[in-house]
Every structure is written in C-alpha cells, then in structure tokens.
Image (cartoon, rainbow, N blue to C red):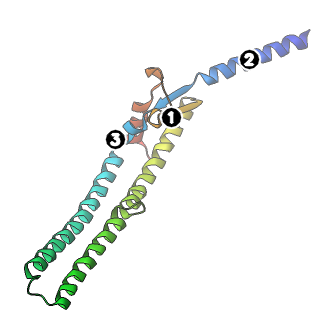
Amino acid sequence: MKKLLLLSLLLMGLCTAVFAESDKIAYIDSDKVMRESEDTMEAQKILMDEKIKWEAEIGEMDKEIERLYADYESKKMILTESGKQEAESKIMELTQLRQTRVQEYFGERGLFVTKQNELLTPILAKMQKVIDKVAVKNNYSMVLDVAAGSVLYAKPSLDITDQIITELKNFEE
C-alpha cells in the first residue's frame, strides 16, 4: 500500500512538473527584433551603400551603351560594312558585360546576397544567444517565432519580443 501511495505521489509530482513545464512557452516576432536592432540598421546601411555603388556602375554602362547606339545610328548610313560590324560588336560586347555585372552583383549567388548573408549571420547568431539566455533565465520550455508564420494565435502576455530587443541592446559577449 505504501508503494502504491508513493508511486501515486511520484506520478502526480511528475504530471505536475510536466504540466508546469509545458506552461512556460513564449514567443517573439523576429521581424520586429531585426527591424529595431541597431546592428541590423548598420548592416542595412552598409548593404545599401554597396548596392548604390553597383547600381551606379551598371547605370554608367547603360549610358555608354546608349551613347554607342546613338553614335552608331547617326553614322550608320556612312559607315562601311566593317565599321557597322565593329560598332555593333562594341555595343553587344558592352551589353553582355553589363548583363554579366548584373548577375555578378544581383544574381541568385551574387555579391548582394553574399554580402547580406555575411552581414546578417553574426546578427542572427547574437539574436539566438540572447533568446537562449532569456529562455534559460525565465525557464521557458519553448520560444516560438510568430514571424515564421506557424503561430496562429498566442496570448499577448506570452510575447517576449520587447525583452529580446532590450537584451540585444545590452548584450555583451
């Protein structure tokens, strides 16, 4: 009988611990955290400065292509056949170079994406460390991200986004 009572108490304690543990769930909005992060703002500025530089280079190529084409059109009637071919070849060459640059800078594996990943990786790692720290400190069993779109409803009292933002501002490694 003592064993049965002890086992019952042990099971009740375990169930209580499981239910108490499952109640410690929180969520964040990682998009909001990223928008309000000073690190992200600085990374965006660096990325946009690079983008502007690359767009300016492509813009200069566009102007040169337009200039060459206008020059070709105005002289087309007096150019020899070889002169026409040479002018067309220059235009095509520069157009292809422009397309190569666009791919190099803004393509799927271009410098823009590479630079973006390079800048965001340490920010995301820092954010994860802060989330881990807050979760451990507050004994959360789980922290969900509403920005991922899988949380359809949650009590606002479970939202720890502002706490994460504050911790990120004060975080020192």
Mark 1 to mark 2: distance in Å? Answer: 26 Å
Image x and y of residue 105, in percent: 34, 65
Which of pointers 2 and 3 lies earlier in the amino acid sequence?
A: 2
Is residue 99 at least partly visible in the picture? yes
The spot of residue 149 in percent (x, y) is 47, 34
Q: Amino acid at mark 3?
A: Arg
Q: Is residue 84 above or below residue 52?
A: below
Labels 2 & 3 near each other (Cβ < 8 A): no
Q: Position of residue 85 (x, y in %)?
A: 22, 86
Image point (45%, 53%), residue name = 121
Which of marks 3 and 1 precedes in the sequence? 3
Total count of labels: 3
Q: Is residue 173 visible to us here?
A: no
Q: Secondary structure at mark 1?
A: helix
**Which residue is found at the position 21% from the left and 65% from the top?**
56
Considering only vertical position in the picture, is 138 above or below 47?
A: above
Earlier-in-chain disc, 1 versus 2: 2
Q: Which mark is residue 13?
A: 2
Say what amino acid the circle numbered 1 marks: Val
Instruction: Classify 10 Å Cα crowding around label 2: few (below 14), some (14-19), many (20 and above).
Output: few
Q: Amino acid at mark 2?
A: Gly
Tag 1 residue: 134
Give whichever of 171, 22 is nearer the camera: 22
Q: Answer with left or right where residue 144 lies relative to residue 75.
A: right
Give neighbour class at mark 3: few <14, some 14-19, many 20+ (Cα, 10 Å). Answer: few
Residue 170 in which image quadrant = top left
Residue 104 as seen in the image, left or right of residue 51? right
In the image, which is nearer the foreground, mark 1 or mark 3?
Answer: 3
SS for callout 3: helix
Q: Residue at x 37, y 64 (%)?
A: 111
Residue 158 in percent (x, y) is at 48, 24
Q: Which residue is mark 3?
A: 35
